Amino acid sequence: MPHTPSPNSDPMPNIQGFIFDLDGVLTDTAELHYQAWQKLADEEGIPFNQQANEALRGVSRRASLMHIIGDRPYSEAQIEEMMERKNRCYVESIQNMTSKDLLPGAIALLDELRQAGIKIGIGSASKNARTVIERLGIADKVDAIADGYSVQQPKPAPDLFLYVAKQLGLEPAQSVVVEDAAAGVEAALAGGMWAVGFGPTERVGAAHIVLPSLEGVKWADLRAKFSNIARQKHSGSKS
Ligand code: BG6
Ligand code: MG
């Protein structure tokens, strides 16, 4: 079998691409998804709050709804109607989105990566990802997009990120995933990719690197950190 490089075995990573999650990483749509779910839960009289919403970060629309309704006996037709209702509310909330809604540091990092010849992909569980990308004005900075229509298995399965890596023509170990959700970090690691977690350690601590935000993040610093991690793992695996 050909040698497949992996973040765990190669001394020097050969990173050629970055795959960004969208909601909660490049823009704060995580909050808008939350508000739409909260409205639906309130309308249905189901207890829900911001803390409960944490479990839904990066989770598909259907799986999110199932989590919210628990074992309440809704029919499939009612489930479909509720998913549509939530989505209408969410779609309305992204109508006025512009490049101003990019999170701090996002555009600077995208531009720096592009200048360094690094390929850029977006891997989002959202069926609205393309609309959000257009509204943010970053479509021309991205080489590949996978969204809620691209694969069957949602995160934490690695399928979505593997799909983007393939579109970029890269091996998993040549790819870095930037994620704000535990399920997304899990998906990246399951796919044999490098993972940058964006947010608190309690949520994304499993990632190779954890960052509080993208502000001031430089490609050279990230590359140095990945090289250090790879070196440590390599010397650890030999001893
Ligand atoms: C993810 C979000 O990116 O997309 C989740 O983090 C959301 O909150 C999921 O549920 C699906 O989005 P959509 O737009 O297809 O309902
Ligand atoms: Mg996210």
Image: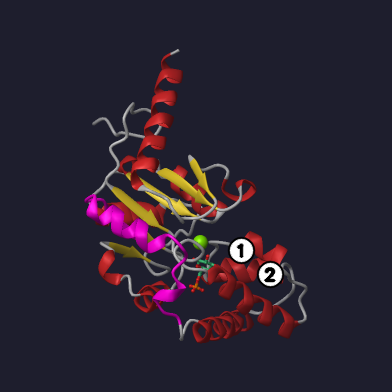
Q: Amino acid at mark 1?
A: Leu
Residue 174 coordinates in the image, percent (x, y): 30, 42
Q: Is residue 74 left or right of residue 140?
A: right
* Element on which disc 2 rests: helix
Q: Amino acid at mark 2?
A: Ile
Can you tell which quarter of the image residue 195 is in? Answer: top left
Residue labelled 1 has its Cβ within 8 Å of some atom of ligand 1: yes
- Which of discs 2 and 1 lies nearer the camera? The answer is 1
Q: Is residue 97 left or right of residue 121?
A: right
Task: Judge the density around disc 1: few (<14), some (14-19), many (≥20) Cα neighbours within 10 Å.
Answer: many
Q: Is residue 152 magenta?
A: no
- Residue 5: image tag: none
Residue 237 coordinates in the image, percent (x, y): 43, 19
Front in this rendered view, residue 198 or 107: 107
Please, is residue 201 above or below residue 5 in the view?
below
Extreme front residue here?
216
Residue 111 coordinates in the image, percent (x, y): 29, 59
Q: Residue at x 60, y 68 (%)?
A: 64
The reply to whether residue 151 is visible in this rendering is: no
Magenta extent: 97-121
Q: Are marks 2 and 1 in contact (CB under 8 Å)?
A: yes
Q: Residue at x 58, y 81 (%)?
A: 86
* Residue annotated with mark 1: 56
Task: Judge the density around disc 2: few (<14), some (14-19), many (≥20) Cα neighbours within 10 Å.
Answer: many
Q: Residue at x 33, y 75 (%)?
A: 137
* Residue annotated with mark 2: 68
